Amino acid sequence: MFANDYHILGIDSRGHGKSTMGTSKLTYKRLQLDVEAVVNHLQLKDIDIIGFSDGGILAYRLAVANRIPIRKIVTIGATWSLSDAELVEKTMADMMAHESWKEIFNFYQLHNPEPNVDRPVECVIEMWTDKTEDGYPHESVKNITVPTLIIRGNDDDAFPLESAVELASKIEKSLLFNLPFAPHDAHNKYPQMFEIITKEFLNK
């Protein structure tokens, strides 16, 4: 989708995919520091960050911290506020029962060096419900100065439209793209539309 036009670097968050959990507590701040360490180690410059869900929350935190050379960020279905954290708490059982989670668990069991999912799941739930400064960026999003494209699906997304509109009003250089009939992973439902809109934003 993007590989012909961009140099792509994909990062597994700790405790996700093929990455092990380690001994540190899992927080959005911890994952932010991990990404910063990778970017600095590779000496990357003028990077664009595309983050889905938790990855989008990391993108907000990275842009707020402003310790790595970010050019633009694109987020998909990424919450940001403490009220969103409370909503996640209420809908967590439904989220974990979704078919997509079964695929994630199966992949983890097959490919992770430490395939027991119990601890990672507990740590992820704790991260999702974290209301400390190590969690969601909340009001600090006002400090984001890089151009930001906020994408959300309109069909049963855990990221409410009202919250997305409020977020867009707080980030000065932001655009909000609401995809009708799309779920939380809107980029998977309409990959071609996602590609067109995202490339237009990145290239403009």
Image (tube, helix red, strand yellow):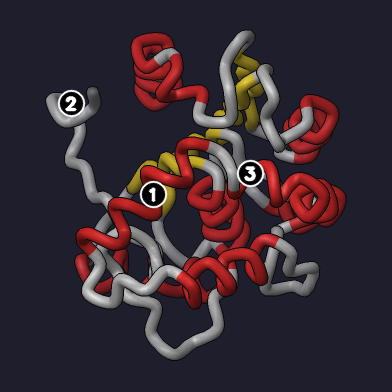
Q: Residue at x 30, y 71 (%)?
A: 115
Q: Mark 3 and mark 2: span between their CA atoms? A: 34 Å
Q: Position of residue 150 (x, y in %)?
A: 60, 30
Name the front one of labels 2 and 1: 1
Residue 109 sits in quarter = bottom left
Q: Which residue is mark 2?
A: 5
What SS does tag 1 mark?
Answer: helix
Q: Which residue is mark 3?
A: 95
Q: Amino acid at mark 2?
A: Asp
Q: Residue at x 21, y 61 (%)?
A: 111
Q: Amino acid at mark 3?
A: Met
First in sequence: mark 3 or mark 2? 2
Q: Residue at x 13, y 25 (%)?
A: 4
Residue 203 sits in quarter = top left
In the picture, the disc for residue 104 is 1
Is residue 197 visible from the viewing direction of this image? no
User: Given contact means CB atoms under 8 Å apart, are the residues at marks 3 and 1 in contact?
Assistant: no
Is residue 96 visible from the viewing direction of this image? yes
State whether residue 58 is above or below residue 76.
below
